[in-house]
Image (cartoon, helix red, strand yellow):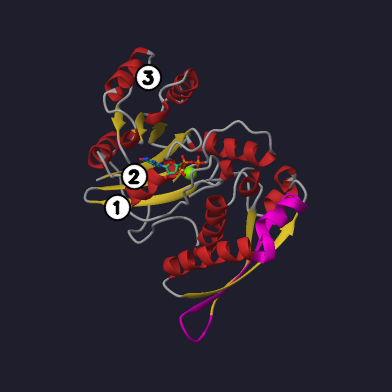
Amino acid sequence: MKSGFVAVIGKANAGKSTLVNVLVGEKVAIVSPKPQTTRDRILGVWNTEGAQVAFVDTPGIYKSKTALSDLMMRTAEQSAKDVELILYVHDGHKGIADSDISLMKHYLAFGVPMLVAYTKTDIMPEENIPADAKRLYEEGIECDVVPVSARRGKNMDKLKAAIIEKLPEGEPLFPEDVLSDKSEKFMIGEIMREKILLRYDKEIPHGVAVLVNTFKKREEGNLYDIDLDIICEKPNHKAILIGKQGKALKDTLSFARKNMEEFLGAKVFLTAYVKVKDDWRDKANLLKEYGYEDGSHTEF
Ligand SMILES: Nc1nc2c(ncn2[C@@H]2O[C@H](COP(=O)(O)OP(=O)(O)OP(=O)(O)O)[C@@H](O)[C@H]2O)c(=O)[nH]1
Ligand SMILES: [Mg+2]
């Protein structure tokens, strides 16, 4: 059989996590229209006849000046090493900028086989696809380019076949029931962060961390008690998060709770506190406390 690790790399907001979720067939990573949604490296395992593929979703490449962003960039960079394949995700509907070419060249130079998933083809003129593929080739990106739409599930079989074809023969890396390396508690924090990304604008969600303090199933009844802190960077952010008479927070919590209940298949009793920790994104001790460790050393 074929098996191996596949690092999913690309610019922020390219559609990496959406693609990983579709490839794995379950939601292992949160998704939002805002760049820098993914902050950790997340494993998603896909089992199919004759192959097991361990996808490693990564934080998107993005220029920003916080210590958290630096840590995220190191995580992405390191994740592209020690893998059997790099799946470079390119947002086709944005065209091809010089920065796309140089990033692809940068990863090609890692000496690991690479494949380009040219995604979001559902929101662009189809006739641009061959011209873009030709341009990539002429610029020296000598690897297969597979156009897909993760949202519409278009051409996914072709992408899956291309991935498996590039993997070496090997034994399974994980037992068949392993889907992700992340715990339910981690996903609960991520679901909360996803709803904040979807509900609030500008810098607010980027400055938010979620710390799950309690994640406990009651002995009786199918019910979880979840208690978490929503940490933001500035007192005015806290006011926006809470909103007039607490309405914004109440709506966001109810939105998150519903999704948590679907995810756990149980009732959720959710309590949340909004706290301010000045500029936590630039403080090494707080980054560590909120679980943002240097992902470059994580082993699966
Ligand atoms: N139309 C369309 N939108 C897509 C597709 N794939 C992803 N998106 C959207 O693109 C946005 C970004 O998707 P993500 O999967 O979060 O992108 P990402 O590359 O993981 O982003 P970061 O984690 O921030 O680096 C979301 O609004 C998705 O719904 C696609 O195939 N078609
Ligand atoms: Mg992502």
Furthest toward the bottom, the residue is 220
Note whether ligand 1 is within 8 Å of mark 2: yes
Let me know if residue 273 appears in the view: no
Q: Residue at x 64, y 53 (%)?
A: 209
What's under tag 2, amino acid-wise?
Answer: Arg
Inter-mark Cα distance, 2 to 1: 21 Å
Query: Which residue is labeled 1 in the image?
Result: 47
Q: Quick check: 4 above or below 178?
A: above
Earlier along the polypeptide chain: callout 3 or callout 2? 3
Residue 47 is situated, as x and y percent measured from the top left of the image, at: 29, 52
Query: Which residue is labeled 2 in the image?
Result: 151
Earlier along the polypeptide chain: callout 1 or callout 3? 1
Q: Identify the magenta region.
A: 218-246
Q: Residue at x 40, y 34 (%)?
A: 89
Residue 39 is situated, as x and y percent measured from the top left of the image, at: 56, 46
- Tell me, for residue 141, which label it has, or none: 3
Quadrant hosting residue 161: top left
In this view, the mark in front (1 or 3): 3
Quarter of the displayed picture in which ligand 1 can be seen: top left
Badge 1 marks a residue whose secondary structure is strand
